[in-house]
Image (cartoon, rainbow, N blue to C red):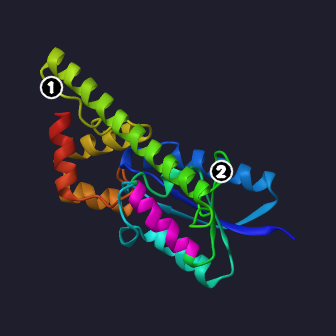
Amino acid sequence: MKTHAVIYMRCSGMGQVIGDTWDRQQSACRKYAEANEIEIVAEYRDEGLSGKTELEGRAGLAACLERVENNGVKLVIVESADRLARDSMIAELIVRQFQKAGVRVIAASGGVDLTAGDDSNPTAKLIRQILASVAEFDRCVTVLKLRAARERKKAKTGRCEGRLPYGMLPGEADVLYRITEMHRLHTKPSAIAWCLNETKTPTRHGLKWHSATIHKILTRSA
């Protein structure tokens, strides 16, 4: 009989939401499950939330915890330790919640049991804390590198690189053309937004269109 488990995934920024982070995390967790004869029965995710966000700020993690506390599933698989949290203190508090529920949390990368550490097993606890600390260190290094890159660009061009204008990402060119054509025909931004919503055309982040959004896009593309 296979062990049942759920997958938990998290990404920090909205840029990652539209990237390959979900496929990568899901693939790593499912490969681990398949190699260990584990059946995945559900998946939970938190989109665009920092690894420093505590449990009460994470609907996906809270739902995952509620599921394993009440439905007999006693195993959670994450891609790596920093998917729980990058801050070692928050990671420790989250792990304790799963420990109280009698649930194991496994990091697919390396197969480390993140919940194994307690007072009788200080080695596993130390490993978990080291993994969280390393993840926090890596995040800080990445932030410093990005900051240095922005400063170099600013020194060369006099401006920092911001988010890509609408129309630069895959699938946006056609929508931008529709917006500009409607505007050329003197259609008001509110009417353009209504048309896009009626045709179920999502914004970059999958939300509804508003006249203010249309106005910004037209201003930037003018």
Q: Is residue 199 above or below residue 155?
A: below
Q: Residue at x 62, y 62 (%)?
A: 121
Could one spot residue 185 in this view of the protein?
A: no
Q: Is residue 7 above or below residue 20?
A: below
Residue 159's disc is 1
**Residue 96 on the magenta segment:** yes
The C terminus lies in quadrant: top left
Disc 1 is placed on an element classified as loop
For the residue marked with disc 1, what is the amino acid? Answer: Arg
Q: Which residue is mark 2?
A: 108
Left or right of residue 120: residue 209: left
Cα separation between marks 1 and 2: 41 Å
Magenta extent: 88-99
Q: Earlier in the sequence, mark 1 or mark 2?
A: 2
Q: Residue at x 36, y 33 (%)?
A: 141
Question: Number of callouts in the render?
Answer: 2
Could one spot residue 180 in this view of the protein?
A: yes
| Secondary structure, magenta segment, majority class | helix
Q: Residue at x 72, y 51 (%)?
A: 32
Label 1 crowd (10 A; few <14 / some 14-19 / many >=20): few
Left or right of residue 107: residue 197: left
Left or right of residue 87: residue 69: right
Q: Which is closer to the viewer, label 1 or label 2?
A: 2
Residue furthest to the right: 1
For the residue marked with disc 2, what is the amino acid? Answer: Ala
| Residue 201 or residue 155, whichever sits in front | 155
Q: Residue at x 50, y 62 (%)?
A: 45
| Residue 166 or residue 143, whichever sits in front | 143
**Quadrant of residue 167 in the image?**
top left
Could you tell me residue 86's position as x and y percent? 42, 51
Residue furthest to the top: 156
